[in-house]
Amino acid sequence: MEGWEESAVTWMLDYGPLEWRLEGYETLRHHPPFMAWLFRQLSAADLTAARESWRALRAAQDVPDPEQHTAQLQGLTGIGRSLRYRAQAADLLERAMRGELFVPRL
């Protein structure tokens, strides 16, 4: 495993499910391309869930406290932004693990 792959595995362990650090999940750590593929799948699913939650909360009609509702929407917006960045990073990481070369863009 190359140095950047070790860093990538550490990053995925930091942001992926806690179970991945447990005994029995060595296959993931020993096969970074598979781990990256699975991490991308999970990141995309998390982002989809956050978006659906935001839509459902926004559409809620029976809001007892409008200020709290606004704060909840803002919180979900921040979570969604973070998940979107993670999903984009996961996609780039998986593509790099498959050997795709990247050209820097401005």
Image (cartoon, helix red, strand yellow):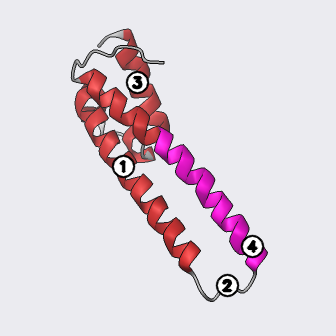
Q: Amino acid at mark 1?
A: Ala
Cα gap from disc 1 to disc 4, whole angstroms: 28 Å
Dot 3 or dot 4: first in sequence order is 3
For the question of whether residue 39 can be seen, the reply is yes
Query: From which residue to which does the magenta span run?
Result: 66-85
Check residue 44 in the rendering and tell me which mark sits there, or answer none.
Answer: 1
Label 4 crowd bin: few (<14), some (14–19), many (20+), radius 10 Å: few
Q: Amino acid at mark 2?
A: Val
Looking at the image, do the residues carrying marks 3 and 4 touch, with CB atoms under 8 Å apart?
A: no
Q: Amino acid at mark 3?
A: Ala
Cα gap from disc 3 to disc 1, whole angstroms: 18 Å
Residue occupied by mark 3: 8
Label 3 crowd bin: few (<14), some (14–19), many (20+), radius 10 Å: some
Residue 40 location (% of width, % of height): 33, 41
The residue at 26%/37% (across/down) is 37
Residue occupied by mark 4: 68
The residue at 28%/42% (across/down) is 38
